[in-house]
Image: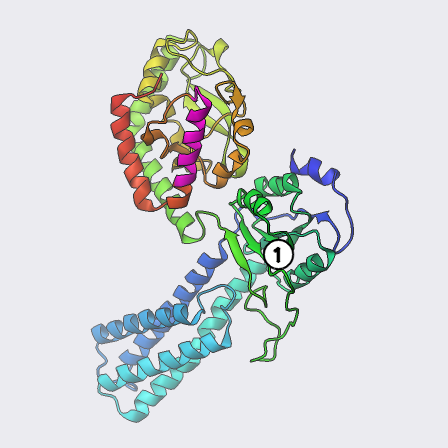
Amino acid sequence: MNLQDTMENWPQQPEDGDFIVTHPVKANRYSQRIVAHLLCLAEAVMLGVIAGAIVSHPLFSAASEIPYAATAGIAVSAVLLMVMFQSGAASYDRFNSRLALLATAMTGAAMIFLVAVLGGSGMDAALRAAAILFLAVPVAKGMTSVVKYWLQEHGYLTRLVAVAADDPRQRAALISLLRRRSDIQLVFSGSPAKFEALSALTQSNQLDEIVLSGHQANEENIAALAGLAVTIVRVTPQDRLNLNPFDPVWGRKQVFGAWNAPTSIVALPPLRGWHGAAKRTMDIVGALFAVVLLSPLLLLCALAVRLESHGPALFIQERAGYRNKPFRMYKFRSMHTAKTDHTGAQLTLRDDPRVTRVGAFLRRTSLDELPQLFNVLKGDMSLVGPRPHPKGAKAGTTLYDELIPNFYSRYRMKPGITGLAQISGLRGNTETEQHLIDRFGRDLQYAAEWTPILDIAIMFRTIVHLCKGTNAF
């Protein structure tokens, strides 16, 4: 069921009743965590430059040499960045915390005072330098806050949240809390049993977080929603939510998060924040390097396919990708054009008459998978991840998603050209149901244990397995 069909069949009720709302969202919404970190880094660099300029000026320091000023600026930047992370200013919710700002300003002033004194300045000059840097901290924060506000107002930092609760009072309390946040848009209010609706929102990139009422945090609901682990799943307290909108210390509206009561996070996406950025960087660099290095081989494979049989060099098939969203995957065509199977319903057999001679060689060596490097560059795939499957793929005689009820949970990561299952002896056809179950387990293990080092190890081991030609036909 797609999102449009789900919305048409959904009982639309005002305000705190059941609803689904779709929002025009940016194609690329940025991680709030990464943006906050980068803005804090920008602040630290600006303050380091200011510190270097102060130290290099003869009014504030007797040691006005450029190397000393540069060293002082770098030291001030590094220390202030550590203070920002320790005080919480590098988090999105506490980015504008006045306590964190005060800690940063006082540390910066103390640092530049010490640097000026060590440079031979008098107490008066050192105090003036400290005062300047103390005042420069809120100025730098103001500049980065403007950038953060612009990104937020233009939808780049918006979080789309679903409230999953049957109890009307708890649902109303949750909605009241979430509506205080200008960076949150509610897209769903309803029962956690409405899994198809939540799944449709997830697939269309219209959902970032699910808030599950504590009254319904049973094992079945948590397991079902955790399967949509491209989202955060948060469980609220069972008894009550504190609706006091004011911070008792500063006497102002609470902005340090949507919650004034503790909540438990029961599911997290495996590649949040910098992990996702690191993996995508590895994919782009690795795929570009491979395309340049292997370009003669790519051309030879394409030419061999075209010369042996009539038809295009590439075979394009729809596969299930990230968030279970379909995408067009590229392969070198290995079968006669009239006998290709776009649904993937029929497994390829040994000595399959549909496969050409060139195609048999390409499949045995996995050279037919090389065009997927362009899928990686497009962002549909990763170099390493769970292998994408066509919708009609079967284990024995059973469709994949019918055999494993939570099969969709493997789509929490982008599909890969190779993966942990493939180097664990589970490459090739799923001729039995157990084969698919074992492969599914490896996919979940990969998502749980991912690190950049694991990706590198899998790619190297893939090369070894390709040389053996195991389970490939």
Vertical comparison of 319 with 142: above or below: above
318 lies left or right of 48: right
Three-letter code, disc 1 = Gly
The quarter of the picture where residue 41 lies is bottom left
- The front one of 30 and 181 is 181
Disc 1 packing (10 Å; few <14; some 14–19; many ≥20) = some
Quarter occupied by residue 326: top right
User: Which residue is label 1 attached to?
Assistant: 214
Q: Residue at x 62, y 39 (%)?
A: 200
Q: Which residues are magenta?
A: 430-445
Magenta-span inclusion, residue 179 = no
Looking at the rendered structure, the secondary structure element under dot 1 is helix
- Identify whether 237 is placed above or below 389: below
In the rendered view, tell whether residue 436 sits above or below residue 214: above
User: Which SS does the magenta portion mostly show?
Assistant: helix
Residue 387 seen anywhere in this rendered image of the structure? no
Residue 433 lies in the magenta stretch: yes
Q: Quadrant of the C terminus?
A: top left
Residue 374, can we see it?
yes
Query: What residue occupies the far front of the structure in this picture?
Result: 219
In the image, 123 versus 259, the foreground residue is: 259
The percent position of residue 33, horizontal first and vertical second, equals 46, 58
Indicate the position of residue 148 as horizontal and vertical percent values: 52, 63
Position of residue 436 measured from the top left corner of the image (x, y, whole percent): 44, 27
Image point 65% across, 72% down: which residue? 244
Q: How is the image coloured?
A: rainbow
